[in-house]
Image: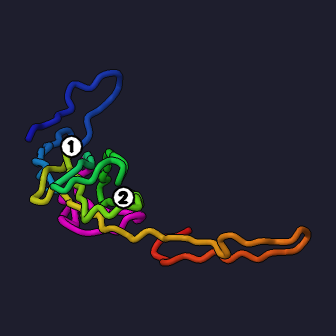
Amino acid sequence: HFTVTLSNPTDGLLLGATTQSIVTITNIVPTAVNISPATFSVAEGTLATFTVSRASSTTAGTVAYATADGPVPDAGFGDYPETVGTLSFAVGELSKTFTVPVNFDNGDDGGEHFRATLSSPTGGLTFGTTLTGTVTITDVPPTVVNISPASPTVAEGVLRTFTVSRTTSATAG
């Protein structure tokens, strides 16, 4: 701690009853940040949502995040966009989220993986125990569309009806 003292007033100023203040400096205890879920699955064409949380909200700070391929079998950046950012925690905030879009690729990839990892905590934040969330991308069967009839013969001036059908409704379209 340290002391601030008023003394030697000039130009008609007088010292009041309180001329001293004792300042106590307290240590800021960093708050650990963690990412969740640690492992989870999402379907192609959806969003992977990560939550970064802390147990105490008495300090402000930031933490960076970034995606990367892996573990094996790796997803590639064609399966999801490279995603980087920084989350800013204000005093009073306990959690933040970020999302990573997962692309639909029409392939049978068999459960590819990517991960999001926390880095560079600042201010009143420090690393917790769970810094990486791993996503397994599950395949969605492609929607197959057909038209019928395939080879109609139509007289000039006659209206012809075609039917478009699909084999699954697993994807929008």
Q: CA distance from mark 2 to mark 1?
A: 22 Å
- Residue at the far top in the pictured view: 11
Q: Which residues are magenta?
A: 34-63
Residue 105 x/y as whole percent:
40, 58
**On the rendered image, what quadrant is the C terminus found in?**
bottom right
Of circles 2 and 1, the one toward us is: 2
As for residue 14 lying within the magenta part, the answer is no
The main secondary structure of the magenta stretch is: strand
The secondary element bearing badge 1 is classed as: loop
Q: Is residue 134 left or right of residue 128?
A: right
Q: Is residue 171 visible?
A: yes
Say which of 116 and 11 sits in front.
116
Q: Residues within 10 Å of mark 2 (few under 14, many from 20)?
A: few
Q: Is residue 107 left or right of residue 15?
A: right
**On the rendered image, what quadrant is the N terminus found in?**
top left
Looking at marks 2 and 1 on the same chain, the residue that comes earlier in the sequence is marked by 2
Which amino acid, by three-letter code, is at mark 2?
A: Thr
* Residue visible at 30% across and 53% down in the picture: 89
Which amino acid, by three-letter code, is at mark 1?
A: Thr
Residue 106 x/y as whole percent:
41, 61
Q: Is residue 61 visible?
A: no
Q: Check residue 122 in the rendering and tell me which mark sits there, or answer none.
A: 1
As for residue 53 lying within the magenta part, the answer is yes
Q: Check residue 74 in the rendering and tell me which mark sits there, or answer none.
A: none
Label 2 belongs to which residue?
99
The secondary element bearing badge 2 is classed as: strand
* Residue visible at 32% across and 45% down in the picture: 84
Residue 99 x/y as whole percent:
36, 58
Residue 126 x/y as whole percent:
14, 50
* Residue visible at 20% across and 60% down in the picture: 134
Q: Residues within 10 Å of mark 1 (few under 14, many from 20)?
A: some
